[in-house]
Image (tube, rainbow, N blue to C red):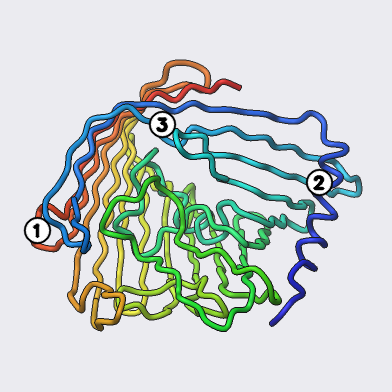
Amino acid sequence: MNFNKTALALAVAGITAAPIAAQADPLDIYASVRVGLWNLEQPFEDSTGTTVGSTSELEIKSFSSRFGVKAETDFGNGLTGFGKYEWDVDENDFSIRHRIVGLKGDFGKITLGKTYHTYYNMVIGPTDVPWWFAGYAMINYTGRTDNGLSYEGGSGNFSFGATAYFAADATAATPAVAAVPAVLPGSAGTAAIAPAPEGGEESIDSLELAATFAIGGTTLGVGIRTGDSGSFGNGVVDSSGDPEDVIGISWSGISLGPVTLGFVYEVQDDDEGLTVELDFGNFYTRLESETLDGASTDADGFRGGVDQDRVGFTVGYVQTLGKGSIIYYEVYTLDNDTGNSDDDLAAVMAVLKFNLL
């Protein structure tokens, strides 16, 4: 299905963005400084990409400090327009975290842009407890994704959603790698969705469908993210480099006395993943395990044809200081299951989060 490149953006943004800019009152401006101390041990690679050892460093850094602005406008007739811009303002990094416009009312909610979309919101998000380390040993951790048009609706204990990702047609394309890399990315929670090339018409390149059910104080979620690489490759690929659908099931909010549990199970062709999250007061733990079936070896060397069982573990504690301000402590380990301990990751951190606005 093809669309004019700007038609959809003009239709939604024209309805929402302009009125918000002209009428929104009050405007909500916010800022959060998140700076801490951490020690990170990670693989060290030579010029050929071969792991030849590991490095360990102690440093003070910013952990996704941010600045944002958001607003809503009442259009009447039960309709509300909204918009949001949020930037990552870490050292040497000034990038967009959220960029959305939307419309909500009795019909549900429509959101267009870069943010957390359907699969994350209904399957991954409910157990995404750690402040920093999450998703490095999961089959598919979406985080914030771009070029998405989402709808969310529901009634009573049932909610459902859908997201369509748009990309410009291209004659040649390389699928975006959704599998988590062995080396720690620079920041957590960013999906591996490639930007669309300029020019051409827009087409639906990938889809997400999900639903949640409230059951006795718990929430059951189920969703699918299509692996169809479409015209530009915004689908997800498995550990062998093939476009395959990801199916996820989550169950969160399970109360066992003072302990709260949550689970996520994902399957993608022959790859499987399980996440278990546990909260106890201000303490939290998260175990991620994925079994990757690297059945084929291609030019990109997806797992090199070797099966792999990756395990990530996070334990953390949140210390409340006052309104909007905390210190969080996290310890994280990642076993890449390569037989080489230099390929593993380990980190210890203490981060102060202070809300300026």
Q: Residue at x 45, y 69 (%)?
A: 176
The answer to which quarter of the image holds residue 256 is: top left
The residue labelled by disc 1 is: 340
Seen in the image, is 226 located left or right of residue 61? right
Front position in the image: 305 or 123 = 305
Under tag 2, what secondary structure? strand
| Distance from Cα at disc 3 to Cα at disc 1 | 30 Å
The answer to which quarter of the image holds residue 7 is: bottom right
Determine whether 156 is above or below 280 in the image: below
The residue labelled by disc 3 is: 62
Label 3 vs 1, first from the N-terminus: 3
For the view shown, which residue lies furthest in the top direction? 322
Q: Position of residue 119 (x, y in %)?
A: 51, 61
Contact, mark 1 vs mark 2 (Cβ under 8 Å) = no
Crowding around mark 2 (Cα neighbors within 10 Å: few <14, some 14 to 19, many 20+) is some
Label 3 vs 2, first from the N-terminus: 3
Say which of marks 3 and 2 sits in front.
Answer: 3
Q: Amino acid at mark 2?
A: Thr
Q: Residue at x 13, y 63 (%)?
A: 338
| Distance from Cα at disc 1 to Cα at disc 2 | 54 Å
Determine whether 354 is above or below 250 in the image: above
Q: Residue at x 64, y 73 (%)?
A: 168
The residue labelled by disc 2 is: 80
Determine whether 248 is above or below 77 in the image: below
Label 1 vs 2, first from the N-terminus: 2
